[in-house]
Amino acid sequence: MPHTVTQARELGDLLRSRRERLQPSDVGLPPGTRRRTRGLRREEVAQLASISATYYAFLEQGREVRPSRQVLDALAAALRLDVCERAHVHQLVHGAPPEPEQASAAMETLPPAVVSLVDRLDPCPSYVTGRHWDVLASNRAARVLWTDWPARPPQTRNMLWWMFADPEARRIVVDWEEEASALLGRLRTAAARHPGDPGFADLLERLHAVSPEVRAWWPQHKVDTVGSGTKRLRHPELGEFTLHHVVLQLADNPEHKVVTCTPSPQDRPRVEALLRRPRPTP
């Protein structure tokens, strides 16, 4: 069976949400009559995946069954899951190699050499996140353009918490809704890799308490992966500007991710000038 009852329910909720978003015409089926349910019927999904309707119903109900990888692939094709969603259902059912249930404080401590490396990357904004997206290190450019991470209370030094709970994030991140939704999808993917880690449950509970977006988006079961791309930020003096970022995993601890951003050639001198200014006196 899936690793936990919670994961079985997660799989069932995901399958149901994806079934309800499809119409018969999306999968080459006739519309039929007296359609009372949103999207496809369970029987239609079962037909498309070549499994019994009863077995599919058990999956949606979160029953303790363990579909094979072949069945999951058939369901992914039937429900038109994308690459991230397909990987996520496999993760929920077949899991990852065994590992400690909880990240210890030592596992979330960076070697001094990594902190020094991040500092030397100025004026390219750079930071390191841990397993739960806690910001473990940041250089001055990242602190000037995002927020002063070390000055924040310890429980708020977290990229998801800042994104959803700090009103400043909506002003700073130009494409806030897109960025926030993708970040929440990455959190879901990571949490599925660590089903016994209470840190994810604690963070999610806190996010649900403060963010209507999290409460609305989490049931949609969006999943996403960490990767390189672009970020558009807004600064009171620089205005809007674009950063190209890459994400690197540390060999000593792959849960530690180094995110380093490169300003465009026209924006780099402006960022450098901003960093040359004297730091405000506490």
Image (cartoon, helix red, strand yellow):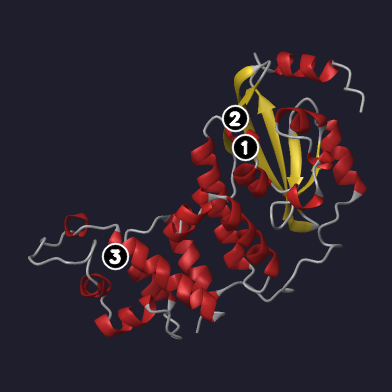
Crowding at mark 2 (Cα within 10 Å: few <14, some 14-19, many 20+): some
Label 1 neighbour load within 10 Å: few <14, some 14-19, many 20+: few
Residue pointed to by mark 1: 167
Residue type highlighted by circle 1: Pro
User: Image point 67% across, 64% down: which residue?
Assistant: 202
Left or right side of 153 for 282:
right
Earlier sequence position, callout 3 versus callout 2: 3
Q: Which mark is residue 171?
A: 2
37 shown above or below 68? above
Q: What is the x, y in percent for residue 229?
A: 57, 37
Kindly tell me whether residue 1 is visible in this rendering.
Answer: yes
Looking at the picture, which amino acid does disc 3 mark? Ala
Residue beneath label 3, please? 78
Q: CA distance from mark 3 to mark 2?
A: 40 Å
Question: Residue 258, located in which quarter of the rendered image?
Answer: top right
Q: Residue at x 79, y 40 (%)?
A: 149
Residue count near mark 3 (Cα–Cα under 10 Å), binned few <14, some 14–19, many ≥20: many
> Which quadrant holds residue 193?
bottom right
The type of residue carrying mark 2 is Arg
The residue lying at 56 percent from left, 80 percent from top is 4
Name, please, the residue furthest toward the front.
209
Dot 1 or dot 3, earlier in sequence: 3
